[in-house]
Image (cartoon, coloured by chain):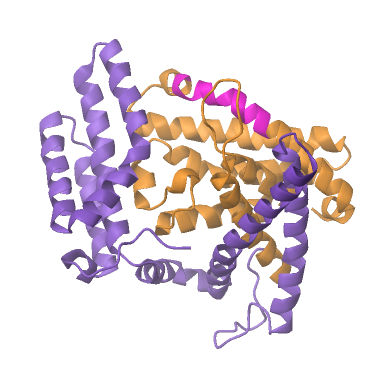
Chain colours: A purple, B orange
Amino acid sequence: MLGLALPGPSWAHRLPAGAKLAALALAVLALLPVSRPLPLLLAGAGVAALHVTLGPRALAAGARMLRPLLWFVGVIVLYHLATGEPLLGAVIALRILVLVGLANLVTLTTPLTEITAVAEWIFAPLRHLGINPRAPALAIALFLRFVPVLQARAGALSDAWRARSPRRAGPRILVPLVLGTLDDAEHVAEALRARGGVAAGTDRPEGGTTWNGT
Amino acid sequence: MERNLTLVALFAAIIVVLGFMPSFSLVSGVPISAQSLGVMLAGTVLGARRGAAAAALVVLVALLGLPVLAGGRGGLGVLAGPTVGFLLGWIPAAWVAGLVTERWQAGNPLLVALTGAVLGGIVVLYALGTLGMMAVLQKGPLEAMLLNLPFIPGDLIKAGIAGFLTREVWRARPALRARA
């Protein structure tokens, strides 16, 4: 599966991921208490300008990522027009668009590997709690690998249903999907154990791992 | 250990695949993804800890910036959006749903799974989702709940489907329930 990040390079791609995330956190803290529309409008213009400096592709991708929010923002504005507080509605709508736009900027310009590196750094202290940091990483890899596998299986199951019945399959089709997935989990677990298990590798903790029980 | 890890990872994948599926047709006419059905299922089938871990895995990967949420959403922007409470609420929702099926071994399977799905996937999830909306939209609890109300019928249907699916899974793999 592809991430949401755009291929670089741009000035924002060259910034370290940790710095961008820290800047984002600071910007959110600074913008949250703002309760007048004008500063938020300026901030919004700034966010849009930042998108523009990254080129037309970033502008289009940023707009696409905001689109699912638009109906929500529309409901908010209409609601506040109805209750006679148009200013409050504008502030809330602008704040959502500005904050989400800023966060999207980080997502669009930071490759997945850099973000996972930051996540690993954040999760590193878990080691002291006896959790193998390899376990979450392995879970993410398995998870991403299995999304297309399960999608293909869901497609095959509904094809098979349609070949036999003129009616819609509906949720019934999910029973074999879930059962097949449970069986897959057994096989994959067996394969992992056969290759030394989760703890295999250089960072095998003494006495095994306790991640997620058993 | 390896088995728990793969179950968690594969159910996280189920949550995502359900989000990609065309939404079920609903009474209210509001388009609703089946993604929260996956969260309910992770809880009722895998139990509290593994179910919550599967939900947490999807949330983590979404925040890292992969388009795993319904409609191809993802990235840190979700945290500033009005649905933040629902997204983060998936984790306790799956946990509560799993707690019900783990603790209530004696009951009728359909009733147990349905109760878990409703308590976790609706009561807990909407409570947290409403809190998130109150924070992002600066609304009182009543107004925020009013905004969420149109989605309740769809989620009741999803809870019913989760109950039915869980019963079928337990029927086909009885060991899962005994051990949950």
Q: Which residue extends farthest bottom? A: A202
Specify the segment rendered in magenta: B146-158
Q: Is residue A77 visible?
A: yes
- In the rendered view, does B107 fall on the left or right side of A195? right
**In x, y percent, where is residue B22?**
57, 40
**In x, y percent, where is residue B77?**
34, 47
Q: Is residue B1 visible?
A: no
Q: Residue A140: which quarter of the image?
A: bottom right
Q: Residue at x 45, y 18 (%)?
A: B142
In depth, the one of A165 and B171 nearer the eye is A165
Q: Residue at x 58, y 63 (%)?
A: A143
- In the rendered view, does B34 fall on the left or right side of A126? right
Question: With respect to residue B90, does B11 lie above or below?
Answer: below
Question: With respect to residue B10, does B144 lie above or below?
Answer: above
- In the rendered view, does B140 fall on the left or right side of B68? left
Q: Is residue B153 magenta?
A: yes
Q: Residue B49: which quarter of the image?
A: bottom right
Q: Is residue B79 magenta?
A: no
Q: Residue at x 26, y 14 (%)?
A: A81
**In x, y percent, where is residue A130?**
58, 72
Q: Quadrant of the N terminus of chain B?
A: bottom right
